[in-house]
Image (spheres, rainbow, N blue to C red):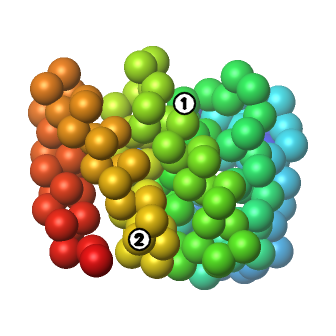
Amino acid sequence: MMDIRKQLLKEHSKENTNLVVSYVAEQQERFDALMNLFLNDEYRVTQRAAWVVGEIGRKKVEMLKPHLKAMVFNLKQPNLHDSIKRNTVRVLQELDIPESLWGEVADICFGYLASKSEAIAIKCFSMTVLLNITQKVPELKSELQILIEDQMPYGSAGFKSRGKRTLKALEKIQ
């Protein structure tokens, strides 16, 4: 039986992350324990748990659904480490976000996308999350287009690539 917290603190490596992913992915209760650490523990533990949460989100996204609301509201906490924001928004790209959370998620992602200081990955993942919401709420289309177009000339290669794909997809939305 693994002590997830102790294992996370052991080392910050891909190998250790994969070990924890394998363990928690076996049972919802284990994943729930990881989420408790991710949402409530001290800085270093939440940072390391974020990587595991991101990996689980790609492999077993259904495990995240009971924690979705808490994850979204966690993004509103001040001074979050980039790994928490990055891995949470990465996961949000893969989920069918419930209508009850569209407003909160859109506000958070528009904030990330508009920010001059936000990491490129967070901005790019936010773009995709906003595109997914815009497909259900077309009224957001022009706001998203303007925000992307304004940043394209100054964006990194990754931002420009994601921006072009997103703008192309937005053209198809009525």
Q: Earlier in the sequence, mark 1 or mark 2?
A: 1
* Type of amino acid at the residue the image marks with label 1: Asp
Classify mark 2: residues with Cα within 10 Å, few (<14), some (14-19) or many (20+).
Answer: few
Is residue 75 found left or right of 173 in the rendered image? right
> What label does residue 124 carry, if any?
none
- Pointer 1: residues within 10 angstroms few (<14), some, or many (20+)? some
Whole-percent x and y of residue 7? 70, 44
Image location (x, y in percent) of residue 3: 81, 52
**Res 83 quadrant in image:** top right
Q: Is residue 3 visible?
A: no
Residue beneath label 2, please? 138
Which quadrant of the rendered structure holds the C terminus? bottom left
Residue toward you, 96 or 57: 96
Tell me the kind of residue under disc 2.
Pro
Residue 80 point in image, percent of width and height: 67, 29
Q: Which mark is residue 82?
A: 1
The answer to whether mark 1 and mark 2 are in CB contact below 8 A is no
User: Of residues 56 and 104, which is closer to you in this image?
Assistant: 104
